[in-house]
Amino acid sequence: MLNDKTKTITIVGGGTAGWMAAAALVRFFPKEHYTVQLVESDSIGTVGVGEATVPHLRYFNNMLGIDENEFITATQATYKLGIQFENWGQIGESYIHPFGSHGYPINEIAFHHYWIKLHQQKKVVPFDQFSMAVVAAEYGKFNYPSDDANSPLSTYTYAFHINASAYASYLRQYSEPKGLLRIEGKINTVAVNNHGEIDHLVLESGKAIYGDLFIDCSGFRGLLIEDVLKTGYENWSHWLLCDRAIAMPSEPQKNAALFTRAIAHDFGWQWQIPLQHRTGNGYVYSSQFISDDVAHKTLLENLNTAPIGEPNLLRFTPGRRINSWNKNCVAIGLASGFLEPLESTSIYLIQIAILKLLEFFPEDSNTAIKRDEFNRQIKSEYEKIRDFIVLHYHLNRRTDSDLWKYCAQMNLPDDLLRKKQLFYQSGHVEKYRHGLFMEPSWLAVYLGQANPPIHYDKRVDIYDNGALPAYFSRIAQEVKNIAEKMPVADRNLYKMVEQKAKKYSTASMSLYGGNVK
Amino acid sequence: MNIPVKKILIVGGGLIGWWAAVFLKKSVPNIHISILNSQVEDTYAETLEPNFANYLQLIGLTEQHIIKYTDGNFAFAQAYFGWLRTGNNYFHSADGLSFDYDAVEFNQWILKLRKNDPSIKIDDYSVSAVAARLGKSPLRLNKKPIAALSFDLGLLKKLLMSYALDLAIDVINKELLAVELDSAGDIDFIVASDASILTSDFYIDASGYTGDLIAKAMGVAYESWSAYLPFHKKKISVVPQQDSRLIPFTSLQLTQQGWLKSIPLKNKIVCEYIYDDALLGAENGKNAIADFFVNGQDVNFYPGQRQKIWHKNCLAMGAAAITADGFSHSPLYLAAVTLKQFMAYWPSHQQFDAVENEFNRLMRTEYESIRDLHCLHYAVINMQAFSTNTFWREIKLPESLQYRLDLFMETGRALPDESTLLHPSQWIHLALGLGCWPRKYDYIASHHSDDIYVQYSQSIKASIQASIENLPDYTDYLKSYIS
Ligand SMILES: Cc1cc2nc3c(=O)[nH]c(=O)nc-3n(C[C@H](O)[C@H](O)[C@H](O)COP(=O)(O)OP(=O)(O)OC[C@H]3O[C@@H](n4cnc5c(N)ncnc54)[C@H](O)[C@@H]3O)c2cc1C
């Protein structure tokens, strides 16, 4: 690192990752001490299909001081309460994985243990019907969650479907007035110093771009982290077989759904993401099993509004850069790894990497421990999300294609196998404190894909005096009643956006809102 | 193993055995609980973490019961004497120190401030710590007390025993003679001293360090922590509390040969001197001890943990499961946490190895994080390099603690770990309080000038000062509290 007063942080790439990083850095790094610059090339496009997000993005926007309604207008966003998974357990089945919890603990025993008992007796409605977010989403109703922990409205939170390219442009407008230096140009070569660190970039024009720290947001390729630093990539395609996607926008839906749809097909799955002005669609599939043409055809056949753009083919290798931070280069976004968008996690992973970078920002040359800790935490985030995505594929009872048969029988990552066995034997979800997906999410998938455990917590029997079924139908009814009273989503969206006096619910780094830590 | 569990037999009549008996009977009333009231070596006094009230509540006790019937006393801080090279003492408390300034965390701006002002002491920013020093009570009579609680072990055991009488707990006043396993390695039955045979569905080993069931019979090994926590001898003595004023804090005094812990109760002070044999060989060492303990009692202890605390149809608790040096998280506290966690993983069917593994995994995470906190106490002695005694220098750090410390020294941050018993801020405050000052603070702290932090710091101290003046004298407070 240079010793002079000001330091230069050079961001390579102007996709979602590059612009999110730029915005956060200019927000927190005083101009007097830091120069933040971003290089992007008009001739190399961005991926920019990132459209479904998780609630954490609200926290990120808050941190930047971005007004939520302004953001909604700028990114043509719609509200999102969860993801609807169709045909995953078996063709014809469907459940919603919500941004919220299900029920509440009774006598200090988790709600789902009671549900499992009643389910064994066939005396209870589906598990997701105990989630406020699910029922509201199904009714097409939305309201801000409440901050009052005693309110049933505190049991969920929300995210957005957004136009990611519009978000990137918005962040550009945010960043430039705060001092961000944008440099247009294609990077031709990269010069390395005698410590093997990145010294400077050379653009096609011949211009040299220096930096103390380089943030590699150059996309799949990893221009610095891989091409130059040869950091290495861990390939996860034996667990995640899909390696391609065809994306294609279509006309907007009449009433935008409050959830992302993830519809499983023979050799992959299709996303459907409602925005204000269009519907985002795509088919994620495995090229081992079908050709791009067949995939394209499948997607076209399954659109429910008319296409309004050309198909966009994307190839990827599921996996993770072995070290996101190597020498004086930190990779963020697709340059640091790729997990398919089944749980809308990519933008979250960008956000996490940025937050960790702020936390462990290298102020001087003594960075080894910061780098190690950063890499450790990023690795753990990726692996935990990977396991959760793999679970969706694994817990299927489909026999209609080799892909699904393979997934049902594949060898699981050790951690996942342990989690699955624990749940199967006892109904317990393995506990951890750091990670995106916690108990409510694991339950949503285990139970949503019809894999109940053989046993529930036997203490439930102590409290079961025969009144449980009635009690549970009352709870389900109550959830319905509350959801029904919420405003209709579409009208509500515009009403809320137009409101002058703006008061949003608290944004937090939680997938479930106030009640679940 | 018999499922569902209808009978539980607790082996060991120490405090922890009795706690287990009462807690289980209260939590699962339809289960038959018996306790083999065999001899177990207990110590004299302990101090419980502030949130222990939640556990007391589960068995129908309150802080007031503890204060009244067990010679109990609140502790608003733990005072460290002789632990700092500066010669200062440090009052560690669980509360406060949460004064962030415009997104800059307390521990970050205080680091920046300290670069130019080495006299900064972090316990000046905690109401509890300041109150404890002055013998005042940060508690108000009309509010539920949240503070650590010290108690007389023997008295609490008596209280639990009398309680057990009303609870239909089967008390067997015998010693343990033998344990028989079945072909699957589960405990089949135990033989009591009068040759009677006792069977149960599940067993709790509260027999102390020897682990009569889990270790002696079932062969589950013990992992020693002696490389990190090298002391294994204590001398305990009880002196009457002569001052009419009560002491609202526990204290730890570092000496050349070990350290002295004092737990003041209402009517007496329990002193434990943790020392090293070899060091005591030196004459001056003997004298140092002699001053404190004329009739002290010798106790051996062996820091470490059981490899698995739940094994087949047996759960180990107390010293059969874990022993540390006593800086924090007392044995009863850990036992209560362990048992409560166990309740959530109740063995409800034949095949439960995954459940057993998960429970053991969780408890190991907790125990090791507590071990690291203990080791931190010795690490800071070396980091400040003020002890001439080579003994301290030979103490090793667990790798995990070394990593935590390296990270802390470079970033001022605690490692985000999976422990639920230790809040990261507690770790940070203890490290700072014991003189372990990170080399760097967050760049974000440099957004404001020192002047602004100085002002902020003064305003915090002023408001603490103002609230202290209105606080009641602790001795008076406690009198009214129990009357
Ligand atoms: C099929 C698919 C669906 C997805 N769906 C979602 C979703 O629903 N939710 C979600 O959160 N995420 C989703 N993602 C992920 C999301 O799109 C990405 O995480 C996000 O777009 C970030 O991309 P990026 O900025 O890292 O890279 P890119 O968008 O690829 O940007 C790379 C940038 O680097 C620049 N660059 C590259 N090489 C050079 C060079 N030589 N010189 C100069 N500039 C250069 C380019 O100009 C460009 O600006 C999806 C991804 C895929 C593939």
Image (cartoon, rainbow, N blue to C red):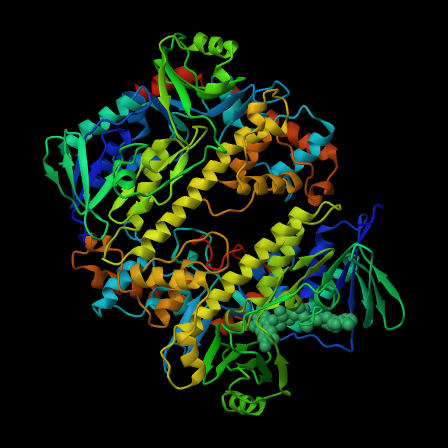
Asked whether the viewer can see residue A61, the reply is no
- From the viewer's side, name the closer residue of B276 and A487: B276
Q: Position of residue B89 (x, y in %)?
A: 57, 20
Query: Quarter-wise, where is residue A69 in the image?
Result: bottom right
Is residue B182 rendered to the left or right of residue B294?
left
Q: Is residue A147 toward the left or the right of residue A476 in the image?
A: right
Residue B418, visible in the rendered structure: yes
The answer to which of B398 and B162 lies nearer the viewer is B398
Foreground: A94 or A149? Answer: A94
Residue at the outermost right position:
A206
Taking the spot 63% from the left edge, 87% from the top edge, the residue there is A309
- Is residue B139 placed above or below A419 in the rendered structure? above
Q: Position of residue B441 (x, y in %)?
A: 68, 40
- B129 sits left or right of B104 in the view: left
Q: Position of residue A44 (x, y in %)?
A: 75, 77
The residue lying at 21 percent from left, 37 percent from top is B10
Q: Compared with residue A38, is residue B383 higher up or lower down, i.e. above or below?
A: above
In the rendered image, residue B320, in percent from the top left (x then y), is placed at 32, 36
Residue A398, picture quadrant: bottom left
Q: Is residue B469 above or below residue B307?
A: above
Q: Where on the image, by quarter, is ligand 1?
A: bottom right
The residue positioned 18% from the left and 36% from the top of the image is B178
- Towards the viewer: A508 or A13: A13
Residue B336 relative to residue A391: left or right: left
Vertical side of B260 occupied by B224: above or below: below
**Total numbered badges shown on the rendered structure:** 0
